[in-house]
Every structure is written in structure tokens, then in C-alpha cells.
Image: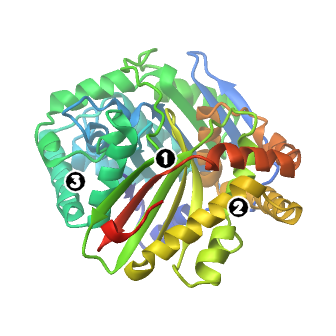
Amino acid sequence: MQKLSISLRQAGALVAGTLLLLSLVVLPVQADVKIQEVRSEKGVTAWLVEDYTVPIVTTRFVFQGGSSQDPVGKEGLANLMSGLFDEGAGDLDSNAFQEKLDDVGAEMRFSSTRDGIYGTVRVLAEDKDAAFDLLRLAIEKPRFDQGPVDRIRSQLLTGIDAAERDPNDQARKQWARAVYGEHPYARPDEGTKESLAGLSTDDLHAFHDSQFARDGLYVAVVGAIDAETLKRDLDRLFGNLPEKQKSVPVARVQPKLDQQLKVAYDLPQTSIQMAFPGLERTEPDFFAAVLMNEILGGGTFTSRLFKEVREKRGLAYSVGSMLSNRRYSETLGISTATRSDRAAETVEVIRSVIRQMAQEGPTEAELEAARKYLIGAYAINNLNSSGAIASTLVELQVTGLGKDYIERRPALLEAVTVADVKKVAAKLLSGEPAVMLVGPDVEKVPAE
């Protein structure tokens, strides 16, 4: 669940101006980002990019864990908790906390994923101290009062009710169970009606106490703040948290491939998903896989899948592939949706494109075009705003890619050869994938 609290500090024109400034903080694309590693007296580390272009401070952080730490039977706990951090903390109940946010004019968001609980605060530099006071309260002393808990839980239950009427959502859950078996990735991170109904404020406090600790924390700060000031702020925000998380071990999982899942639903279209093996980001041929994926289905209008499925045959509006790197598992996924009477043809076309890539690899021209795009688009996609830079810096820390990754990345892509891509394509695409079809008459569609 992701919540956004944005408020007004003053009335009239000043309000409009403040909101405009906060919501439209788009910086010039920064290919040359100067990252400082800042360490506080209490040992809290953050990556900092000083930028005084606009008087804004953006802070992004993550506590590793997320919904993969939900206890069995308490699915949805991380999701529910992430919706409650701005619903009261310390001596401020929900209304008082929201009023303080209004006074400060800060934007505060929290969300959870399978692997982490994320937070973001963006505020005018002159109001940073007041905003950080509220953030410290939210992080250290969330209240989880019964009223807000019941209200947020009700919102989540409404979402689950709607999802039960969405065949694609139900199929997604079946797909997760089929691919990940008993692993936490197979369980619904949004929870179920039964699990959400059983969650108590004691569960929320216990989960918060187990996850919010300094050893699972990664922080990035971008904006009008210097390193010495940030050191003091890091201790103020995170210095009083426990040193160690109390997380339960989560095993790595190999997705169960070579299987077919056909889900019959009376839909206008048939959706098709395939899962192949992926690669850890630290593996030597990861960048060859990135380029292979871009040529196969990553490039929206230039990929082989798009040309064969959309342009030549008009089988689908969109089709693509994506490398997915979670903390405990990796996959290469392919997805599209097509007219049900052409589902079999679409599956065969996709398989033909995959076979050709696995057997022949890319051409030199394809590789060069993909390389040029991936090098040129990185700054546009990842460094075009203070929020984007902060998010990128947190993910670089989580994945252990290093402070100099942005500088090293072009050379890593430049070093990949056609032979490298052909080798990794054969490695990832030669086996039988997991295939899921959702739509009418799917039993009649040969998925292999």
C-alpha cells in the first residue's frame, strides 16, 4: 500500500506556489551525479547528492524485509503498517499529525514491497527540521491507534473485494503459487480478508519493532543540505532505532518453470505470460542479459517481439519482456494480451522469436542500437528529478552496485559482444518456461 500526505502551509497564492514547487521539482537531467557517502556519529550511513538548484530536500529510505516477513496467517501486515505511519505518532493522534504536516507543507509517503518498507519525505529546505521531527516520530513511535487501523484495514478490504471480481488479479495469485510454491513470494502481500481481519495493534507494534532497525536501513538524500548537517539529521532520524533487525530467514527460491497454467475466464482477450530463468545482478553476464532483453522485448517499439507480434501480425497492442530481480529470486518474464481466437497463433509467434534468439543471438546492428539506447536513456529515466535520483541511490545501495556504478555502467555495456549476448540468450531461453494463459477456451490453446 502506498499513501501520500501532502498539505498546505499557507493560504492563497502562497499555498499554490508552494504546492507547485513541491510537485514540479524536475531537475535538469544529471548524467554526472556527485555522490557523497555520509556516516553519522551513531553509524547511520546515507548517500547524499547536494543540489541547490531549488530549495528542496528529498529523503528516501528503505528498511529491508517487506511483506516477505509477514508471518504465516498474518499476510498483509507490512502493507497495513505502511499505510499507518502518517496516522499518528508519539503524542500526536491522527488528526494532530496531519495538522502538523499541513503546517510544515511536507510530502510524506510510505509503501511496502515484497522486500522492503520504503519512505519518502520531500520538503522545502527552510522547513526541513520540522518535517524531520515528524518523520522521526513516525519512524520511532508510530501509534497504530485502533481508529486509523480499522479505517485503513477497511480500505484494504475494499480493494480485496474488487480484486476478487478481477479475473486477471485472481490469475496473478494462482501464477505466484504455481511459480513460487511455499515461498513467501507466493503469498498475497496485500493480505486476505481472513488475515487482515485477524491483525491487531499488537501485531503491528511487534512487526515494527522487528523491522525498523539500523542494520537493514538504506538512505539517500538529495537537495539543499550539506554533509555535516545531514550527519546530525541522520542521528536525529534513525540514531535511536535498535541496531539489529529481528527478521526471519527467507530462503532463495528458483521459480518453478516448465509448467503450464490455464485459467478459464470469460474475457474478451486472452492474456499470456511466460517466465524464464533470470540472473542475479552481480553475475558477470548480467549486462549481456540486459542487452538481450532489450533486443527481445524491452524496447517498446523496436524489439523483436513488438515487430513480430504487433507490427507484422497485429496480434496485440503491446508485448514485452522484463528482467525481474527480487532479493531472493530472479526471472525473465514475457507478457501480452490478444484476441482469444488468436491466442494459439500468438503463443507460437512468441515461441518462434524466443527460439531464434536462443539459437542465433542478436545481430551487430541490434546490439549497437540497444547499447546506445540503454546508455543514453539511463539519466533520463533515473536522474531527472530529486525524487528519481533519491530512488536510484537507494536501489544502488540495496543491490550493492557501488557508489561509482553510474560512472561504470556505460563501460560495462560497451564491453558486451554479440557472442556474449548469444551465450546468455542460449542459457536463459533454451529451457521450457512457465506459461500461463487466462481467457476463454484456454484449454484448446497449445501452450508449447
Which residue is label 1 attached to?
121
Label 1 crowd (10 A; few <14 / some 14-19 / many >=20): many
Q: Amino acid at mark 2?
A: Gln
Mark 3 in CB contact with mark 1 (< 8 angstroms): no
Q: Amino acid at mark 3?
A: Leu
Residue 367 appears at what percent x and percent y? Answer: 83, 59
Asked whether 129 or 41 is in front, the reply is 41
Q: Amino acid at mark 1?
A: Val
Mark 1 in CB contact with mark 2 (< 8 angstroms): no
The residue sitting at 70% across, 47% down in the picture is 426
- Quarter holding residue 43: top right
Q: State the mark number for residue 389.
A: none
Which residue is label 3 attached to?
156
Q: In the figure, is residue 191 to the left or right of 232? A: left
Which numbered disc, 1 or 2, marks the residue that appears first in the sequence? 1
Label 3 crowd (10 A; few <14 / some 14-19 / many >=20): many
Describe the colour scheme in one phrase. rainbow
Residue 315 appears at what percent x and percent y? Answer: 52, 81
Q: In the figure, is residue 312 to the left or right of 245? A: right
Q: Is residue 170 above or below residue 350?
A: above
The residue sitting at 48% across, 34% down in the picture is 254
Which numbered disc, 3 or 2, marks the residue that appears first in the sequence? 3
Residue 343 appears at what percent x and percent y? Answer: 44, 74
Which residue is label 2 attached to?
356
SS of the residue under disc 3: helix
Residue 109 appears at what percent x and percent y? Answer: 42, 49
Q: Is residue 159 above or below residue 282?
A: below
SS of the residue under disc 1: strand
- Quarter holding residue 113: top left
Which is closer to the viewer, label 3 or label 2? 2
Task: Work out whether residue 15 can be spotted.
Answer: yes
The Cα–Cα distance between marks 3 and 1, rounded to whole angstroms, is 23 Å
